[in-house]
Amino acid sequence: MAFLQVNKHSQILYFYFVIFISLCSCHNANSQQSQIRAKIQGWSGKVDFGFDILSNLFINPTVGSGENRFNIGSSLNIQTIYNEGKFSWLNDLNIDYGIQKNSTRRGDESNIEDNKAFKKNIDNLWVNDKFLYRTSYFSKFYYSADLFFNSQLTKTYEDNYITDITDSGQPISNFLSPGLLQASLGLDFYPNDYWSIFVSPLSYKSILVLDDEIANNLATDNAGDFLGSLHGNQFTRNTDGTINFQNYNNQFGAAVRITFKNEFSKRLFIYTNLLLFSNYGKEPEHIDVNWRNEISFSFFKGFRLSLLSSLNYDHDVFVQISDNDAPSGFSGFGRRISYSQQLVFKYSYNFDSNKKTIKLQR
């Protein structure tokens, strides 16, 4: 009965604590298994670079035949692993960037600059580092520190232009405006070479908006009513009705990260990385999601066709609501799942540096 009387926040904290203690209890039992295992030491990893290009050129086109269009995008993924004894360090860096330009003249001089300017297709910087330590070479459990960072690379102006064609002088987003930084301590379970399950009852998350002008952007609904800060940074309401925006939003909670990576028949490669976060201090029932996926098909000596996708949800962040019936393609702001997708050709290079293998037996 005493448990039923605690508040909802305490119940969620207790739930994650029980999971963490249960995994710790399994740690000692698992480490006693008798087996032979090869332990790779030193650096190893891979580098993937991909691109997609689409170009249409028309000179004196016939009526209804189309219009000029140029689209170029790139994707870079670097994954490294460093093993030294019972310590491991995993790095995963992803950069996605793409721009496009449509040349459509409608007889309106105001559209001329629009026709010359490039818009962003995608701009995403995604980094995940793990520091792992296990007490036995034969254990599948690691004490782990998980670091995650997400932002964009360059400035974005109104309507996703990469240059300031309206001469506003102020971008709507930039590097670290917004940005996401998350650090978690917990236990990582590797049941085999493909899966990883990380549970952390102690996770710190910070939404960063370092540019003061961008931090002051607010989100409103279609009726013009105030919803909150656009990028999720904190704000306070004054008695005179004005709003003061801050450059951050610090949160403490619990996190779970699940990863899967496998190559089937040396042709099909599947990778998924799912991060979940619950804020102890505010509405812990709303789970923030950051989910990155890749499905690749190898067709010739390191060359692959890859479908990259990213799904995100943050209860503090308001996104543009896609609406095909709206003139701009968007209808106001709201709390929604955000999804992006790329289809790219990639070249993959695997490397090993001063790698050695030691065989262990118990």
Image (cartoon, grey):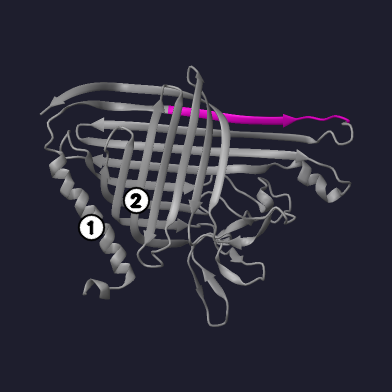
Check disc 2 and give the amino acid type: Val
Q: Quadrant of the C terminus?
A: top left
Q: Is residue 56 magenta?
A: yes
Question: Which of label 2 and label 1 is nearer to you?
Answer: 1
Please identify the quarter of the rendering in which residue 249 is found.
bottom left
Q: Position of residue 333 (x, y in %)?
A: 61, 61
Magenta span: predominant SS is: strand
Q: Position of residue 137 (x, y in %)?
A: 17, 33
- Quick check: 76 above or below 170? above
- Quick check: 52 above or below 15? above
Residue at the far top: name it: 301
Does residue 72 appear to the left or right of 138 in the view shown? Answer: right
Q: Residues within 10 Å of mark 1 (few under 14, many from 20)?
A: few
Q: Position of residue 65 (x, y in %)?
A: 84, 33
Disc 1, SS: helix
Q: Residue at the location (31% across, 27% down)?
A: 43
Q: How many marks?
A: 2
Boundaries of the magenta span? 47-60
Q: Is residue 330 magenta?
A: no
Check disc 1 and give the amino acid type: Val
Q: Quadrant of the N terminus?
A: bottom left
Which is more toward the observer, 134 or 194?
194
Q: Residue at the location (48% across, 35% down)?
A: 294
Q: Position of residue 242 (x, y in %)?
A: 57, 76
The residue that mark 2 highlights is 256
The residue that mark 1 highlights is 18
Which is more toward the observer, 157 or 190?
190
